[in-house]
Image (cartoon, rainbow, N blue to C red):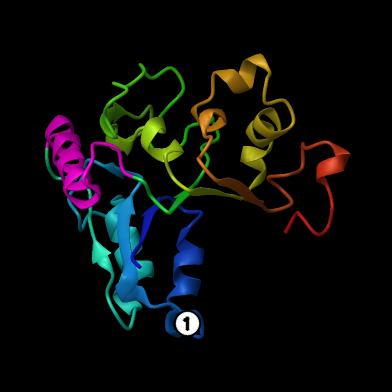
């Protein structure tokens, strides 16, 4: 069977992608059975240094022995048109408006954003899987999966490192019902199956003692 995964950009997942593209991992996975999608994209050309697509190509896809099916977000289009185009792509692949990814890989912003869904962003249309958004940092125009699309996934994995994320991690994991967490897009991620967090020690530094076990924190 084919496995559908949605990948994120940014500095955190790059080393993971490079590891997967190196021996022995590049030979242990049947890459031809994967369908690769993106969680979000900056509205830039695909060869731009800021492109999430380019990051995945340079660190992962370029070195694979077999190519998966690749469905990139067309960041070179105006944001609204790019979101509509990806919505159509997802509907063609999955046969319904909302995709059902097997795995979504997410990073975490220091402000609690996830993909390109930022705190204070207006809620998207419930029926849509992809929306155009605005980042507070350049490049500002973005395209992003919605929380509805992310939460329809079977498994979601957060990959977080660095002390600048420690306060947000603690707000989400140690006090999920708190006022701060309720206003964070990352705290609203609740997939159909498993939700897994991979943290380094710096990102976990503000968590209570019961989280600080050597077998759970890298």
Q: Is residue 115 visible?
A: no
Query: In front: 127, or 207?
Result: 127
Q: Which residues are magenta?
A: 78-99
Relative to 36, say whether 190 is above or below.
above
Report which quarter residue 139 is drawn in. Answer: top left
Bin the neighbour count of mark 1 within 10 Å (Cα to Cα): few under 14, some 14-19, many 20 and up: few
Relative to 201, say whether 35 is above or below.
below
Asked whether 87 falls inside the magenta stretch, the response is: yes
Residue 32, percent from left and from top: 30, 75
* Dominant SS in magenta: helix
Asked whether 173 falls inside the magenta stretch, the response is: no
Q: Which residue is mark 1?
A: 28
Give the side of residue 173 with respect to residue 160, left or right: right
Residue at 64 percent of width and 14 percent of height: 179
Residue at 47 percent of width and 82 percent of height: 28
Residue at 30 percent of width and 62 percent of height: 35
Give the side of residue 108 with respect to residue 132, left or right: right
Give the side of residue 35 with respect to residue 29, left or right: left
């Amino acid at each position: 069977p084919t496995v559908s995964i949605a990948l994120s950009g940014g500095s955190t997942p790059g080393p993971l992608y490079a590891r997967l593209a190196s021996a022995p991992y590049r030979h242990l996975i049947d890459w031809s059975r994967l369908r690769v999608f993106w969680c979000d994209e900056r509205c830039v050309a695909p060869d731009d240094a800021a492109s999430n697509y380019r990051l995945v190509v340079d660190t992962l896809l370029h070195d694979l022995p077999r190519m998966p099916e690749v469905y990139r977000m067309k960041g070179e289009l105006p944001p609204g048109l790019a979101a509509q185009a990806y919505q159509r792509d997802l509907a063609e692949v999955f046969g319904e408006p909302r995709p059902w990814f097997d795995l979504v890989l997410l990073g975490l912003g220091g402000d609690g954003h996830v993909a390109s869904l930022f705190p204070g962003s207006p809620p998207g249309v419930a029926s849509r899987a992809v929306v155009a958004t605005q980042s507070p940092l350049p490049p500002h125009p973005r395209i992003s999966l919605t929380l509805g699309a992310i939460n329809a996934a079977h498994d979601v994995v957060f990959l977080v490192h660095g002390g600048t994320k420690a306060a947000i991690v603690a707000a989400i994991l140690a006090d999920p019902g708190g006022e701060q967490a309720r206003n964070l897009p990352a705290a609203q991620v609740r997939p159909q199956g498993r939700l897994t967090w991979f943290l380094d020690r710096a990102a976990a530094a503000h968590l209570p003692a019961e989280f600080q076990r050597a077998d759970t924190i890298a």
